[in-house]
Image (cartoon, rainbow, N blue to C red):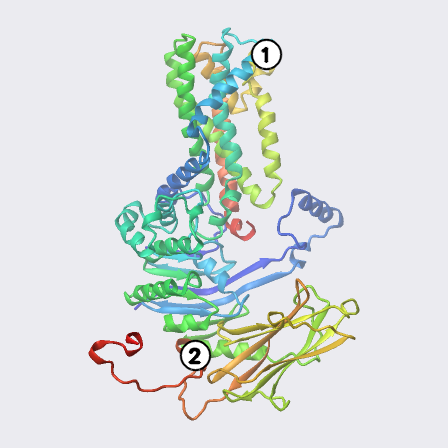
Amino acid sequence: MSPRIEIRGLSKAYVLGTGKSQYVTLRDDLAAFIRRSIWREASERTARDELWALSDVSFDVDEGDVVGVVGRNGAGKSTLLKILSRIVEPTSGEVRMSGRVTSLLEVGTGFHPELTGRENVRLNGALLGMTRGEIARRFDEIVAFSGVERFLDTPVKFYSSGMYVRLAFAVAAHLDPDILIVDEVLAVGDVGFQRKSLSKMRAVAGEGRTVLFVSHNADSVRSLCDRGVHLRSGRVAAIGTVEEALSSYHAELEEGAGALDGTTRREPDGIGGALIDSLTIWDGDGQPRSELDSGEEIVLVVSLRVEDELIGQPLYLGFGVDTGFGSSVFTTFSSWQGVGFTPRDNTLRVACRIPSLPLVAGRYFVSASVLGELEVLDRAARATSFVVREQGDEILWPHHVATHGSLRVECAYEELPVAEAGVDPEVAA
Amino acid sequence: MEVVIKRVEKPRLNLREIWAYRELFYLLAWRDFKVRYKQTAIGASWVLFQPLFTMVVFTIFFNKLLGVSSPGGNYPVFVIVGLVYWNLFANSFQNASNSLVANQSLITKVYFPRIIAPLATVLVFVVDFAFAVAVLVGVMAFYEVRPGLSGIALALPMLLVTLLWACGLGTFFAAVNVRYRDVKFAVPFLVQTLLFVTPVIYAVGLIPHAFQIFTYINPMTGVITSMRAELVHQGTVSWPGVAISCVAAVAAAYLGTRFFVRGERRFADIA
């Protein structure tokens, strides 16, 4: 079987501007031109920073494959997607695709607030490559799927954001391409609608269509795709089954975690004034730990360096825990409990105590942030990680986190007496 | 159907592809037209009022107060013939220049031949033009001016010359506008200057005879002067001049679209 998508040596370089602003004015360029001709700064252009968003990417996608492309932010996923969608041109290399290609970079492309739902369906469908005949044929189906029949002749500016997304996705879901290229546009709408969209996507994949799905959320990639590509700094780091690609991606994430131990000086990721120096995990006895059992006491400890002008000002701390697959497990802020901390000198240490860790087995990443009255002063994303050990009474495969969730909820099972004559005893009473 | 994506060294205008995207072209024009008069009380009637009102204002100020005369003596008819074509040019040019920036959200999210954006914008004003022609017919009937047959025959070719000229300038400035937002400020100024350089308010006879032929390098001079002479019998037209106007319009359309297509690959990078 010949591959449906053939990517050969694909590279894309962006020239980084010298200024902060992307919008140059004629005057700036004229000034640069004059400088160049007077000072013979002929090499200025090459001296500018070039960013290789993609370098030498090659892989094939066979007919009927559903391929997930994963990678961190800035790994080149969006660039790849934009090249495949013909929005930007590659610097070198080429892509061959056979069949009708549709790419979905956002839902509701071209939706105009002043136009009615009906009018926007026509416009959006045409933008996504549907012919007038196709739109007319599938119009009723699209409307039924969206569930906004009643508001079809209302301008979409009066729609709730949920209705807007449903209508937009309904158009996308009724495209009929041979190759579908999708960004993580599924992460919109309410949960019920997301599920509906996801199963629609799965149906599309099941019909032997080729799908390229780009996401940083490993959970949705796993549930949708059968093959995976892991991009790292613009290059292909792994290619193969979904599990192979995801474990490579996971390994990359783990490399980055735990680096924050107070020895490295960083720039604040926020407005500054206080800097997170270290983030460590203790057990209930104050011993540093990296592996814990579910239900154990856990203490998240953060050390801060505080600049002089913030001494005596209240600071608030926040912690977040995620699965490393892009799914957040929980977030907590000291301000939610009305707790602030006033540093008396240049250092501050705060502990957040969780009496019983409610998580199933797996690896979790911890982020911390420090806030002033209004703004985030510094943030340390995934500064450390810990492992919750498997317990004897549960058999867990890593991917169960994706389908079953990551919370371990305390619950009690009991058998109830069978209700008489079909009447629920609770209701009858 | 196979799609090959790679860097093209010298891109050319792909007419077959533009034809394939004609539905989107109509839809974008239709969208702009629909959206324009939303939340207005008199809606599309504005299309009729604008040329009529401008005609009245110009007649009062230029003809009655400043004493600008027209060769045939009927200034309102004289000025509205010019305005019908001038407005098409000015609106098309100005809005086409802004079309890529206005459709930025589309350009960074979905593929289509980018030239559709300025062309669809121009199509909107062709619809306006049709309404303006109806106003012109009404004004001519009111003043009992019999249209010349040669003028009727010239109406469509001159429409084409106007469109080529507007598309040439419009595509050029639209491409420049992606990079230099200065265009947004420069184009209205340019249109205003052109209004005075072009014989819209005055007759071409006002210009010293030796220089008249040079004014035809501006295609709108050829369009307006020939329509006035042939349709409403006001003034004379230099046919070699009209030929110059036609050549200039074709050249502008060729150079403008060429510049546009060459720059097309960078639009999404810097838009």
Front residue of this view, candidates B126 and B260: B126
Callout 1 secondary element: helix
Give the residue type at disc 2.
Val
Q: Which residue is mark 2?
A: A401
Q: Up-down: is B267 above or below A392?
A: above
Residue A45 is marked as none
Q: Would residue B242 be visible to someone looking at this image?
A: no
- For image coordinates 78% across by 66% down, the residue present is A309
- The local secondary structure at tag 2 comes to helix
Residue B239 rendering spot, x and y as whole percentages:
47, 16
Residue B204 at what x, y percent from top left?
55, 14
Q: Residue furthest bottom?
A: A392
Residue depicted at 38% across the width and 46% down the height: A120
Find residue B206 and name its label.
1
Mark 2 chain: A
Q: Is residue A305 left or right of residue A49?
A: right
Mark 1 chain: B
Q: Quadrant of residue B146?
A: top left
Residue at the front extreme? A429
Number of other residues with Cα within 10 Å of mark 2, as a class: few under 14, some 14 to 19, many 20 or more: some
> Are dots 1 and 2 in contact, CB under 8 Å?
no
Mark nearer the viewer, 1 or 2: 2
In the rendered image, the vertical position of residue A61 relative to residue B33, given as above or below: below
**Same chain check for tags 1 and 2:** no
Q: Name the residue located 54 percent from the left edge and 67 percent from the top edge.
A: A73
Residue A321 drawn at (x, y percent): 54, 76
